[in-house]
Image (cartoon, rainbow, N blue to C red):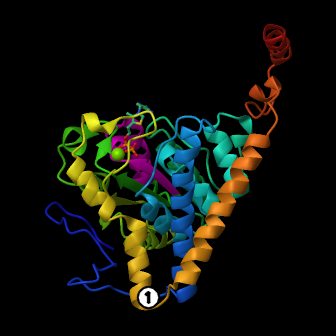
C-alpha cells in the first residue's frame, strides 16, 4: 500500500506505452477478467458517446460528459464485490450499468423523468449526487454502519478535484478515518472544476497529500490506466475489509471534453493539452495492452462494441416510450409515512395543472 508522503509524486501505472515503458501483469487477473474490464470500458464509452448524440437530438437534457474518465470508473468498480456500495457523482452517472441498472433508467434520469429513479438497495448504488461532495458523508455513514452491524461491505465515494475543497468532503473523510469506516475515497482529479483549474483549487502539491492530514493512506495513480486504478482500489478495498479504515485514491487524468453539454471550454482551456489527452485516451490504451498480450481480436472488439450500441439503442427506445409521469410521483419515495397535507397538496397541484 502506497503511503503518499510529501515529495512522492510518481503515478502508479500498469499499462506501458508499447515502446520503452513495459507493461506489467497483475496477479489474480485472468483473461476473462481482462475481457470483462474491456466490456465495462466499452460500455461506458458507448454510453457517453451516444448520450452526447441524444443530447444534440434533444432526446436527453443537459449531460455531464465523462469521455476519458471510463478507466477510473471501470477499474475501481471491478475491485468491488456486489455487496459493496457505490456513491456516484454526476460524473459517474452511468456506473450503475456495471451493476445491472438498465440504460433506460439512467437515460430517463438525464431526461428528468421519474423513471430515472431506482431503489439504491436493489443495486447497492446510491442516487447520482449533483451537489458537490455531499455524498461523501453519506458514504462514510453507510460504511460505518456496515462495520457496526458486523457486515464486511465496503463503500466507495466518487468525487472530483473540486470536491476536495468542500466542507462535506472534509467531514466525511475525517469521520471515516476516526471511525475506521470501510470507505474508499476515489478522487477523479481531472484538473478542472468547470473553469477553475487545479492550481486555483488547492495549494497542495498533490491531492493525495490530503490523506496524510486525515491519518489515512493515499495513493496516486494514472487515471487513464484501468489496471492501475483497479490495483490501487483493490488494495484500498482489502484494507477497508480488514478493518483498517479508509484510503484516498487520487486518479489523475485530464478533462478533454466540456464539463457538461452546457459548457464551452474554448474560453479557458488549452486546446493542445486537450489534443494530447484525446490521443492518450484510456480505452485505446487498454486495447493496445490487450492486443500486445494477444487477448483481444478484432472479432471480439467488434462484438463488444455492437453489444454496447444495441444496449443503448434499446435503452433510449424504452426511455422515450415511458408515459408522461403522473404528478403523484412527486410525492412518492419522499417519506415512509407521508404527512397528512400531501393529499390536499396533490389535489391543488392537479387543479393547477388542469
Ligand atoms: C455544493 C455545490 N456547489 C457548486 C456546484 C456547481 N458545480 C457543479 S460541477 C462543479 C465543479 C466540480 O468540479 P470537480 O469536483 O472537480 O468535479 P468534475 O466536474 O471535474 O468531475 C461545480 C462547482 C454544485 N453542483 N454543488
Ligand atoms: Mg474536476
Which x, y percent locates residue 315? 70, 52
In front here: 40 or 232?
A: 40
Determine which quarter of the picture holds residue 275: bottom left
Q: Main SS type for the magenta part?
A: helix
Left-right relation of 85 to 271? right
**Can residue 319 be seen?**
yes
**Spot occupied by residue 264 in the image (x, y as percentages of width and height):** 35, 35
Q: Which residues are magenta?
A: 156-178
Q: Quadrant of residue 107?
A: top right
Instruction: State the residue at coordinates (26%, 33%).
Output: 267
Q: Is residue 168 magenta?
A: yes
Q: In this view of the protein, which residue sits in the foreground, 24 or 294?
A: 294
Ligand 2 in which quarter: top left
Q: Residue at x 41, y 52 (%)?
A: 178
Which residue in the structure is indicated by mark 1? 27
The quarter of the picture where the N terminus appears is: bottom left
Amino acid at each position: 500500500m502506497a503511503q503518499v508522503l510529501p515529495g512522492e509524486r510518481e503515478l502508479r501505472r500498469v499499462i506501458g506505452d508499447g515502446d520503452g515503458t513495459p507493461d506489467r501483469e497483475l496477479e489474480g487477473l485472468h483473461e476473462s477478467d481482462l475481457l470483462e474490464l474491456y466490456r465495462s470500458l466499452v460500455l461506458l464509452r458507448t454510453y457517453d458517446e451516444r448520450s452526447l448524440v441524444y443530447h444534440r437530438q434533444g432526446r436527453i437534457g443537459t449531460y455531464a460528459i465523462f469521455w476519458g474518465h471510463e478507466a477510473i470508473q471501470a477499474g475501481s468498480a471491478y475491485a468491488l464485490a456486489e455487496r459493496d456500495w457505490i456513491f456516484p457523482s454526476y460524473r459517474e452517472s452511468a456506473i450503475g450499468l456495471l451493476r445491472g441498472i438498465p440504460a433506460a433508467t439512467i437515460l430517463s434520469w438525464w431526461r428528468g423523468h421519474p423513471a430515472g429513479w431506482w431503489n439504491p438497495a436493489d443495486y447497492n448504488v446510491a442516487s447520482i449526487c449533483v451537489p458537490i461532495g455531499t455524498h461523501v458523508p453519506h458514504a462514510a455513514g453507510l460504511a460505518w454502519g456496515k462495520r457496526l452491524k458486523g457486515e464486511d461491505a465496503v463503500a466507495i465515494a466518487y468525487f472530483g478535484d473540486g470536491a476536495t475543497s468542500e466542507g462535506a468532503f472534509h467531514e466525511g473523510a475525517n469521520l471515516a478515518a476516526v471511525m475506521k469506516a470501510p470507505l474508499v475515497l476515489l478522487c477523479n482529479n481531472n484538473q478542472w472544476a468547470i473553469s477553475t483549474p487545479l492550481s486555483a483549487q488547492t495549494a497542495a502539491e498533490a491531492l493525495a497529500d490530503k490523506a496524510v492530514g486525515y491519518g489515512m493512506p493515499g495513493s496516486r495513480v494514472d487515471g487513464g490506466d484501468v489496471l492501475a486504478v483497479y490495483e490501487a482500489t483493490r488494495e484500498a478495498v482489502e484494507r477497508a475489509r480488514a478493518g483498517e479504515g479508509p484510503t484516498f485514491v487520487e486518479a489523475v487524468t485530464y478533462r478533454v471534453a466540456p464539463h457538461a453539454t452546457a459548457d464551452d471550454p474554448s474560453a479557458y482551456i488549452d486546446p493542445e493539452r486537450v489534443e494530447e489527452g484525446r490521443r492518450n485516451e484510456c480505452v485505446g490504451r487498454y486495447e493496445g495492452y490487450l492486443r500486445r498480450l494477444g487477448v483481444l481480436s478484432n472479432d471480439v472488439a467488434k462484438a463488444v462494441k455492437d453489444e454496447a450500441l444495441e444496449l443503448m439503442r434499446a435503452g433510449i427506445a424504452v426511455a422515450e416510450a415511458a408515459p408522461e409521469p403522473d404528478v403523484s410521483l412527486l410525492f412518492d419515495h419522499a417519506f415512509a409515512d407521508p404527512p397528512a397535507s400531501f393529499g390536499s397538496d396533490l389535489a391543488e397541484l392537479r387543479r393547477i395543472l388542469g
